[in-house]
Image (cartoon, grey):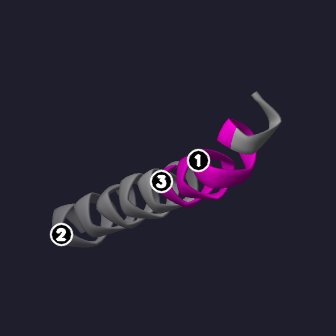
Amino acid sequence: MKEFLEDYGSIIVISIIGYAVMSGLWKILIQVSSV
């Protein structure tokens, strides 16, 4: 289990951060385009 977390933990963290960044950018784009 520890090896699994070492292998996939970083991938999961990166995907979560990437999703958060993309959703944040999407909200900003919507606000900018609606102005």
- Badge 2 or badge 3: first in the primary sequence: 3
Instruction: Tell me where residue 26 appears, x and y as whole percent.
Output: 30, 59
Kind of residue at disc 3: Ser
Callout 2 secondary element: helix
* Disc 3 packing (10 Å; few <14; some 14–19; many ≥20): few
Question: Closer to us: mark 2 or mark 3?
Answer: 3
Q: Nearer the viewer, residue 6 or 35?
A: 6
Q: Quadrant of the N terminus?
A: top right
Q: Nearer the viewer, residue 11 or 34?
A: 11
Q: Is residue 25 magenta?
A: no
* Residue located farthest toward the left when viewing the structure as drawn: 33
Examine the rendered structure and indicate whether residue 17 appears above or below residue 35.
above
The answer to whether the residues at label 2 and label 3 have Cβ atoms under 8 Å apart is no
Question: Closer to us: mark 3 or mark 1?
Answer: 1
Q: In the displayed structure, does residue 25 sit left or right of residue 2?
A: left
Q: Residue at x 65, y 58 (%)?
A: 10
Q: Residue at x 38, y 67 (%)?
A: 25
For label 1, the residue is 8
Kind of residue at disc 1: Tyr
Q: Residue at x 28, y 72 (%)?
A: 32
Callout 3 secondary element: helix
For label 3, the residue is 15
